[in-house]
Amino acid sequence: MLRNLSIELVGLGKALAASVVLSLLATLLIYYTGLAETLFAPLGNVIMVISVFWGACHVSKAHGSKGLLRGINIGVAFFILMFIATLIFNPSLISMKTFLFTLMLCAVSGCLGGILGVGLSNNI
């Protein structure tokens, strides 16, 4: 079934799955330790960066070229999905500052993951 999907959709799916798994781990970590709940926002940003980075790296490694462009595409696609989910579940969280910061974070981590993916590919 995964062979029928494009590499970009598989990479985006891996990024979303990594985001869910890392979020669950972070929640368990905060719940069962004495860490403050104020760590949720920074941990969310770190989880987002790791997830987008991993998805972009996977896509660029599979293609072997244009890592910067492919990474930005994965980062922006991930951002759009997160933005839609935020609009559905809690639109009051959206402000111009968080919008731009999150978009920039997704794009930069996607770029870096895409560059690393091209470096790791065997298609050179």
Image (cartoon, helix red, strand yellow):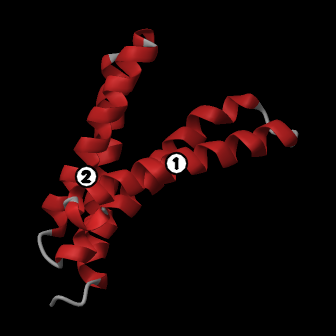
Q: Nearer the viewer, residue 56 or 17?
A: 17
Q: Residues within 10 Å of mark 1 (few under 14, many from 20)?
A: many
Q: At 12% from the left edge and 69% from the top edge, which residue is drawn?
A: 66
Q: Is residue 35 above or below residue 1?
A: above
Toward the front, the furthest residue is: 1
Toward the top, the furthest residue is: 92
Asked whether the viewer can see residue 72, the reply is yes
Q: Position of residue 105 (x, y in %)?
A: 35, 44
Q: At 25% from the left edge and 52% from the top edge, which residue is drawn?
A: 74
Q: Nearer the viewer, residue 65 or 101?
A: 65
- Residue located beneath label 2 in the image: 74
Q: Residues within 10 Å of mark 2 (few under 14, many from 20)?
A: many
| Occupied quadrant, residue 64 | bottom left
Q: Position of residue 88 (x, y in %)?
A: 38, 15
Q: Is residue 24 above or below residue 72?
A: above
Q: At 23% from the left edge and 78% from the top edge, which residue is drawn?
A: 118
Mark 1 secondary-structure assignment? helix
Q: Looking at the picture, which amino acid does disc 2 mark?
A: Ile
Taking 124 as reference, is 77 left or right? right
Asked whether the viewer can see residue 94, the reply is no
Q: Position of residue 57 (x, y in %)?
A: 32, 68
- Residue located beneath label 1 in the image: 47
Could you give the CA–CA distance between mark 1 and mark 2, rounded to whole angstroms? Answer: 15 Å
Q: Answer with mark 1 or mark 2, whichever residue precedes in sequence.
A: 1
Query: Could you tell me if the residues under marks 1 and 2 are in contact, i.e. CB atoms within 8 Å?
Result: no
Q: Looking at the picture, which amino acid does disc 1 mark?
A: Ile
Taking 49 as reference, is 118 left or right? left
